[in-house]
Amino acid sequence: MNSFEERKNSSAASAGRKFAMPPVKVACLSCRSRRIRCDGQEKCSNCVAKDRPCLYVPSNRGGPRNCQNRKRRKTGDTPPSPMSLSDIVVSSEDDGIQQLSGLDAALTGWGSDEDDLYGQLVSMSEPGAGLRSVDSSIEEVGQIFDCIFSADESHAPSEPDHSVSDMVQVYGSNEDIIDAYYVFIHIYYPILPPPERLPVTNRPLNVKSPFQPTSPLSLAMAALLVLIPRPDVKQASEAEYTKLRRDLAQSFAQSALDAVEQDLELLDSSSDPSKALSEGAPQLTRPPLHSKLPVSLEAVLALVLLSTYEYAQRGNIRKLCNRAGQALTAAMSMSLHEMVEEDEFSEARKRAWWMTYITVCQGSIVSGVPAAINVYDPRFVTPYPKGWKLLIEAQQTILEATTFVHDLNETAKSRFQASWIPSRMTQLNTQITQLLLMCRECTSLTPNTLVPITDSPDQLALQSIRHIAEIKLHSSRIKIHRFCAFSDIPIFRRRHCDLDSTASPSPQCCGLATPATSTEPTSASSPDNSSLASSSTTAATATPPPPPPLGFPFSPHESSKMCLQAALNIVRLLDNLPYPNPDSTVPLTSPPYMSASSRVEIPRTMPTFACCIMQASYAMLMVYMKARPMHSNGADALDSSKGRAWIGLVNELQQNLRIISKTLANYAIASEALRGMKDEVSHWVFLDG
């Protein structure tokens, strides 16, 4: 009886609490992300059972909780101190509640799991021109910073002995950051002069370091570099690793913006504002990051890098335009647009100005609107850097093509004043053809001489620049012929640059209807093989009345053929872009892997031409949909010469769409916003021939 009573009392006592054992003070990242209870061991039982990495970040919270009523009764206690960034961290898993970041975190907590899931879904469905919106919170960011950069070990847990620097790519000096920039960024986005020494290698920290970057440019570089997985992390795609890289990148980016503001601050503004207004100028005393780069240019280049970060990582086109506008204002205030004298810094000034110019144009291109500035402003007289002429002219051309598409859509809606279309379309087509001939002439000057992957990053950058310029020109051709060839019928589920989504109304032509099946939420990993076939069947049966002619100087057949050729050329050029080479060795695979023991590809970075990739995908899919109804008359038709040609076309389109899907997947490793594009293309990869 005594034993029964003891069990009864024990059951009654335990009914009032969730767990028999008190919660641990520090939970591992894996248990935190899954909101499950952790036992706090060096390798917790949950991670051991699921064969997951068990990693810890030190927490400043935990211990007993005091209810709000008790806190209100403590009127005689000391006033609360302001909340700091390091205080906004994830709690241990005893009560299943997490603190929100910012001011709201001080007032409210997370709701139910359903509310959390709903909030996450809403945040991921925000508009971003087809880009995945990755809106990082700042929870854990201060704690992560402390773990990496603080020399004080007192806040680290006694066990286990893991450091965040073991999980992400952070660096112990400005020199290491610059070398990593030359490895991963410069070969696609050469904002700096050539490296001062060769070879350059990637040397992320393996231990905690007191070093913390202070230059806005080194912080902006760190924001992009930390998104690249560490070579020795085998499960880099795990949710906790991805979130850790994302949060730390956002912290670096915010610190870079703060450093830009500090660089532009005038000392006299605090002591003598009248003197600052008359003759104030920023006083920068720190050493330069590069011997050929003036310190004053670091803020401009930081804003340029942050523009691409906002676009490719966070999917925020508005912030891309804002950062580019800030960079343009700062560059013109330094008269970078009219620098003609030659000195040791002239190359850095040329690159800073023209990369700022390209970024401003890029904001208009991805927004699908005309430029906010005169791109042919006669005041812009700074000479081009060597080998950049075609890239800048290609950027101007694709911006003109974007303006043409914008004006054409407005004219198509109104059906008035369409007389400008033939001459403008012919002029742009001729301009594109001439520039493509110049690209081929540049390539023919060095026939069959590929730049060795162990060569200077600046040589690789010149090769990439030529490829990117040609990609932009082929994309320009698709833009100006798209309406004539396909009447801009949408097929993608989300908007991508100036390609409308299936939810948007659009005109119809050529006997094609908007594919209804493309709006279904199909998994990228297992796309519906019959969706394109059913779309094509719908296209074949629908016969909407043709719209009034707009007077195109090309036939739909001619425009469709040019779009297809341009799309295939884009895929070829994409496939030829170099990969980063972190250790200056010859890789054994293509694409190369992060390390010999890893199956994570080395990601390409700076996908400033992502819209061009979607233009190529659109053109190939529309050619397929337009041709399929003509060759769907049974097996006998496939035995004819036209039938065999049709099968060859389908196979070619399949292969090229797979290359595009693989390319976007590689970019998405370090540019999360591009996953939306990758998922979109993967949905259509398997064509039902």
Image (tube, grey):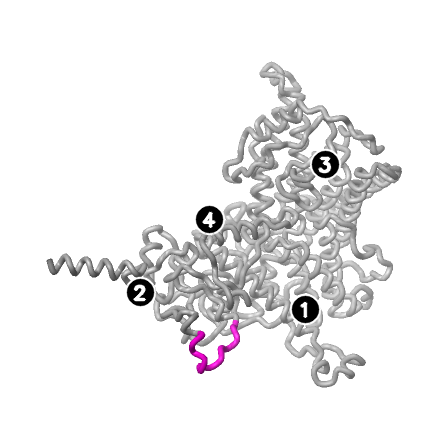
**What crowding class fits label 1: few (fewer than 14 Cα within 10 Å), some (14-19), or many (20 or more)?**
many
Residue type for callout 2: Pro
* Element under disc 2: loop
**Mark 2 vs mark 4: which is more N-terminal?**
2
Residue drawn at x 73%, y 61% as measured from the top left: 325
Nearest the viewer among 293 and 304 is 304
Q: CA distance from mark 3 to mark 4?
A: 43 Å
| 413 with respect to 207 (left or right) | right
Which residue is the extreme one toward the left? 1
Residue type for callout 4: Arg
Q: Nearer the viewer, mark 3 or mark 4?
A: 3
Q: Nearer the viewer, mark 1 or mark 2?
A: 2
Q: CA distance from mark 2 to mark 4?
A: 40 Å
Per the rendered image, the range of residues in magenta is 72-84
Which residue does the numbered mark 1 point to in the structure image?
Answer: 298
Which residue does the numbered mark 2 point to in the structure image?
Answer: 22
Residue drawn at x 83%, y 31% as measured from the top left: 549
Which residue does the numbered mark 4 point to in the structure image?
Answer: 599
* Element under disc 3: loop
Q: Nearer the viewer, mark 2 or mark 4?
A: 2
Which residue does the numbered mark 3 point to in the structure image?
Answer: 506
* Residue 251 pos. (x, y %): 56, 65
Residue type for callout 3: Ser
* Element under disc 4: loop
* Residue 66 pos. (x, y %): 39, 71
- The answer, for residue 685, to whether it is visible in the render is yes
**What crowding class fits label 2: few (fewer than 14 Cα within 10 Å), some (14-19), or many (20 or more)?**
few
